[in-house]
Amino acid sequence: MAAVLIREATEGDCGEVMRMIRELAEFEKLLDQVRINEEVLKTDGFGENSFYHCLVAEIPPDHGDALGSTVVGYGFYYFIYSTWTGRNVYLEDVYVMPKYRGQGIGSKIVKKVAEVALEKGCSQFRLAVLDWNKSAMDFYKSKGAKDLTVAEGWHFFRFDNEAMRELVKK
């Protein structure tokens, strides 16, 4: 495999990232929950007050390939804050196209997020994995992540849009 470049995404990458977001959602059997599009990605990630950061994994073109470099994966993250430990980074997604898996690309993305977290003074790097995705759990554990559900009994909760609307009515 050729060298892989892990770099910050640009607005021009949003189409490829959106395609891979849909691929990941389909793999997770949650495609019906994808509500954003390429324009939302551009607005939310590249405006004055961006809501997220994104890394892309790019492979250079083969010799004679007129198409140029190819984006084959991404890592979506943002910063959160803990009242106990201060700055944290939350990894929303890591995705590598199936054809390119098993080549260390996901590991390079995770490593780069950890590097960013340390550069920004973060005390923790957090993420969530669906309970049926054993390969993802094993991957993160092999990198040194601790399963807080098992170790500390934490459960993650979410208010969706409808629940928020009901909450503010009360």
Image: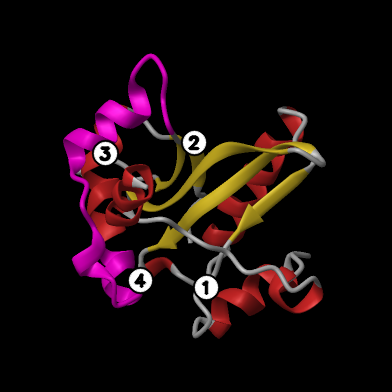
Which kind of residue does numbered mark 2 sit on? Arg
Who's the residue at 71% across and 28% down the image? Answer: 120
Q: Which label is found at residue 99?
A: 4
**Disc 1 to disc 3, C-alpha distance:** 24 Å
Farthest front residue in view: 170
Horizontal and vertical percent for residue 46? 35, 23
**Disc 2 to disc 1, C-alpha distance:** 20 Å
Query: Mark 1 highlights which residue?
Result: 102
Query: Mark 2 highlights which residue?
Result: 7
- Regarding mark 2 in the picture, which secondary structure is present there? strand
Left or right side of 61 for 142? right
Label 3 crowd bin: few (<14), some (14–19), many (20+), radius 10 Å: some
Give the residues in magenta.
23-51
Residue 15 shows in this picture: yes
**Mark found first going from the N terminus, 2 or 1:** 2
Label 1 crowd bin: few (<14), some (14–19), many (20+), radius 10 Å: few
Who's the residue at 81% across and 40% down the image? Answer: 85
Q: Nearer the viewer, residue 138 or 78?
A: 78
Residue 138 sits above or below residue 19 on the image: below
Q: Quarter of the image holding residue 45? A: top left
- In reply to whether residue 36 is colored magenta, the answer given is yes
